[in-house]
Image (cartoon, rainbow, N blue to C red):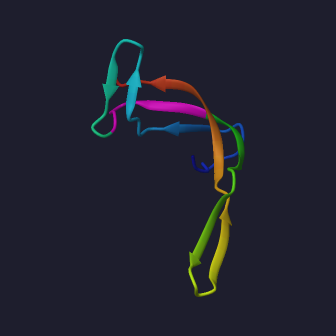
Amino acid sequence: GSKLPGEVGDTVMFDQVLLTSDGETINVGQPFLENSKVAGRITARGKNRKVLIYKYKRRKGYRRKNGHRQHFSLVRIGDIETGA
């Protein structure tokens, strides 16, 4: 995931839809479906777990330790509009 622009409670629209399914038929885009949109609401923001990066070169006394926490936005999908 990634951090989306907007605040918690805001509505976001995704217009690059790769695939839709209604349980019987599956529509796959090439690469995206035309006239399809997905609406969602940002429910939370946060940071993911820490990823540690450790660089080491043997016999040279070279050691580097670094950490990174990726920001993310949690989105609840509400409405899916298909172009069919």
- The reply, left or right, for residue 64 in relation to residue 27 is right
Asked whether 39 or 66 is in front, the reply is 66
Query: What residue span does the magenta drawing correspond to?
Result: 32-40
Q: Nearer the viewer, residue 64 or 49?
A: 64
- Whether residue 81 sits left or right of residue 25 in the image: it is right
Residue 84 shows up from this direction:
no
**Which residue is found at the position 48% from the left and 25% from the top?**
80
Residue 23 percent location from the top left of the image: 41, 13
Q: Position of residue 39 (x, y in %)?
A: 54, 31
Q: Position of residue 17 (x, y in %)?
A: 41, 35
Residue found 62% across the figure and 69% down from its top: 54
Looking at the picture, does residue 69 appear above or below residue 74? Answer: below
Q: Which residue occupies the foreground of this view, 73 or 15?
A: 73
Q: Quadrant of residue 35?
A: top left
In this view, the residue farthest toward the bottom is 60
Give the residue drawn at x 35%, y 25%: 83
What is the residue that sits farthest to the left in this orientation?
30
The one nearer the camera, 8 or 21, is 21
From the viewer's perspective, tell me whether residue 2 is left or right of residue 31: right
Please say whether residue 19 is visible from this viewpoint.
yes
Where 30 falls versus 1 (above or below)?
Answer: above
Residue at 49 percent of width and 38 percent of height? 14
**Magenta highlight on residue 39:** yes
Reply yes or no: does residue 36 show up in magenta: yes
Residue furthest out toward the top: 24
- Label count reads 0
Q: Which quadrant, please, contains the C terminus? A: top left
**Residue 55 horizontal/vertical position (percent):** 58, 74
> Where 25 falls versus 17 (above or below)?
above
